[in-house]
Image (cartoon, grey):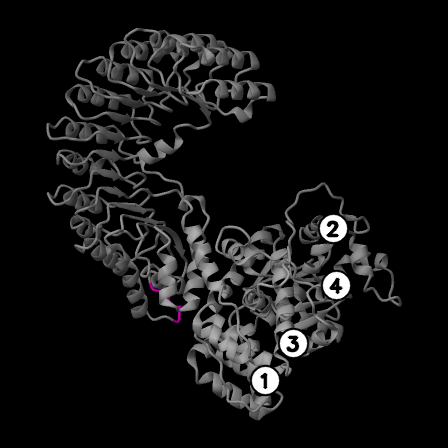
Amino acid sequence: MEYGILTRAAAEAPGPATVAMNGPEGCGKTTILRKVMLEWAEGTLWRDRYTYVFFLSVDELNRVVETSLAELLSKDWPESAESLEDAFAHPEKILFIMDGFEELKFDLSVKTDMCGDWRQRWPTQVLLGSLLQKTMLPGCSLVLGFGTRSMKNNGFLLNCPVLVGLQPFSEHYRKLYFFHFFNNADEAVQAFGFVSDIPPLFVLCESPLVCWLVCTCVRWQLERGESLHIDPETGTSLYVSFAATAFKAGRSDSLTQNRARMKSLCSLAVEGMWTEAFFFLQEDLRRNGISESDLLMWVGMRLLRRRGDGFTFNNRSLQEFCAALYYYLRQPKDQLNAAIGTVGQMVAASMGRVHTHLSQVGGFLLGISTHRILNQLEASFGFTLSKSVKPDIIQSLNILGQHEPDKGEVNFQRLFAALFETQDEDFVMKVMNFFEEIFINIEDTDQMVIASYCLKHCRSLKRLHLCINNVFPYDCSSPISEVQTIFFWRDLCSVFNSRRFQVLKLDSCMLDDVSMSIISKALARPACRIESLWCNFISNFGNGIQFSKGILHSFHLKYLNLYGTTLSTDAVTYLCETLRYPACNVEVLVLGNCDLSSEVSKDLACVLVCNKLKSLSLIENALCDEGANVLCEGLKHSKCALQTLIVNFCCLTRVSCDYFSRTLPSNICLSTLDLGSNMLEDEGVATLCKALKHRNCTLTELCLTSCYLTPACCKDIAAALTCNESLKTLKLGNNEIKDAGVKQLCEALKHPKIRLQHLGLELCKLTTACVEDLASALIICKSLKSLNLDWIVLDHDGVVKLCEALSHLDCVLELLGLDKAVYDEESQMLLSSVEEKVSHLTIVHEPWLQEEYRMRGVVPLGSNLK
């Protein structure tokens, strides 16, 4: 069906066509593209539309640094044909069929001012990129074969493409494939019947690649008169069955020769994987010990195939399997190939964030390591395989487990898939216990099954960062039933009941009533000792009844973060009732960006008087002044124990400052108040300053960033600072304080009663003119420990004056917020010199960013959850 869509799209487009065929590895893209080329050559396809069709295996160009289109095509251009120049005179009659993008090393998005001249030599990536973007031969048509990764990387370059997605083989097409593969109808019936009777194997044959593997394997067994046998338990098992059968097909009497032959083929495979080479010349084969007779044997068995001047493995997965098998064939006495990494390097590369083309090699490497697979291979090969690989794998994974999780050293999707391949519970448990914190993104039901299997074997898990989508509501396209899906989800949620488990972060999860009920019940079990729960951007949160019930019985829970999850009024009501319950011990509550309005303020105010809640973040909610007024009534209550209130970006005005001004003197607990990103203006801050002057005001940190302030407010702020001994942190960033305002603040910093330790003036439109005031204040003030001047660029004279103050013996500043990278080289050297000279001083860009994220409950994806 996809073949018909592709051919019609390329034939019927009114102008130059760009048709992109997209599908995962092994879905038949190359076969379809070669069939298209063959049918055009035979005159049965596009006879009237295209006079010239060029087939380019672009992965063959990995070794070509520079070429022209003319040079690229001329080597296969028939001498009897008209010239390329005559052909290119009519680009509308030209079609380029391109395949092999998945193995291409080049970045095709490289920008260049190219003229599109097909005669001129260009860097290879520029040439290919220009063909895709139609800056060269814009009138020609393109038919392209992309894998999943290459489509993601290069699809944006295409101009109005027609996309053709390849679908798995239906049962009908699987049967057709078998009868086409076997020339003998009786053999086809026998083979198809054998496979049909093994449901897991029959499902795997949805992939054309698996169909080829299975049919080839069955044909060899039939030719030798053997009983048909293929192990479909895992993908590795399938390739092991294929390799064992293939080896028998080309087996000689000498075990030494057999090992050498197999190892030379696998050496070629693994060298290619490490060097990203998928097209091999004769010199590559000779270097890895493949003789001419061996080459003929491998080609005859269709493990290798000829392509132009060289050879490739019959498919990418076959090369990946052979690459993994190499490590089991290698012996201690073998001479090392510098291009081939060790087992540890392969594990680190395939299970980490780099070398993504090695991920499946790592999967096969772990899959082969089990006793069952090794015994099966040894029985088929007739010689022993290395037993040192598995300990090396375990040691390497142990090292990965010691890295900080937020450094992104481990791709848990790949690791889980590889561990699942082994089906070795002892091995999985040993590996999983290396990890205390796990980041996993579940994108379909199959991935949830794999994650459930691995996580339940992790006895050391303390922190889990989970994103789950395309599973709930139930995914009808999955072969796994709805009942099984619920079972595996319940199995996954059971990991929360470990006594070691402390932190769960659900990020951008799409749940439904059933899945929410299951997770809520897991949290409510007595065995659950979770201390910190994040539910960020949860879809279908509902009315929150089930969730609140789960929270009610989570006696150990201290931190609850619902940032980005839309909460209905009813959901907030149920949640607040739960938080007020005596058994609930939540101390930190984050409800930022939850689409709250002033209507819920009454419920929130009631929570404030329960004498447990210590911190409340309500950032990015339209509470407005009405909501602030209600909250302030709660803050005034004698049982209110709240220490931190974040109402950043809550649509407040100067009116709210009146409410807070009346509240602060009567609240002895509140120490941190963040009013940033609200339109308070100078008048509102003047009102707040009156409260700061009150002897009963215990506020230690006040954030007024982005509050539309001008220099006029600084007189009131300066007066408040000189008589307030509690306030230690004042953040005024992103306001038009300007040099005039800083001058007044600096006068306050020189006052003998000043106690301020941290001052934020980033993005306050300061210039070099204020440096003299700042320098003087830094030398005199004995309390100021940190000053944020980030996003402010001074001229060199200003840097000199600032550095002189920082170097002064009386300057006690420990942290300066400044981006050295935006200054000229001379100023950078001066700043670095001062930093080295003054042992207690650190100069850093965005010094408070992480702490502000933490306080507001906004943690960037991938950050550590400790």
Where's residue 719, x and y in %? 29, 9
Q: Which mark is residue 65?
A: 2
Name the amino acid, label 4: Glu
From the image, tell me which residue sits under label 1: 220
For the record, the magenta segment spans 474-479
Name the amino acid, label 2: Val
Q: Is residue 242 visible?
A: yes
Mark nearer the N terminus (1 vs 4): 1
Spatial separation of the CA atoms under disc 1 and disc 2: 42 Å
Spatial separation of the CA atoms under disc 2 and disc 4: 19 Å
Relative to 633, is 133 above or below? below
From the image, tell me which residue sits under label 3: 257
Query: Split into 4 quadrants, where in the image is the C terminus?
Result: top left
Spatial separation of the CA atoms under disc 2 and disc 3: 38 Å
Most foreground residue, 692 or 846: 846
From the image, tell me which residue sits under label 4: 283
Name the amino acid, label 3: Gln
Where's residue 62, x and y in %? 69, 55
Residue 40 highlighted magenta (yes or no): no
Q: Which callout, 1 or 3, points to the residue nearer the camera?
A: 3
Name the amino acid, label 1: Trp
Relative to 425, is 842 above or below? above
Relative to 364, is 398 above or below? above
Residue 478 highlighted magenta (yes or no): yes
Spatial separation of the CA atoms under disc 4 and disc 3: 21 Å
Where's residue 108, x and y in %? 65, 50
Q: Which callout, 1 or 4, points to the residue nearer the camera?
A: 4
Query: Split into 4 quadrants, where in the image is the N terminus?
Result: bottom right
Q: Secondary structure at mark 2?
A: loop
Mark nearer the N terminus (1 vs 2): 2
Q: Secondary structure at mark 4?
A: helix
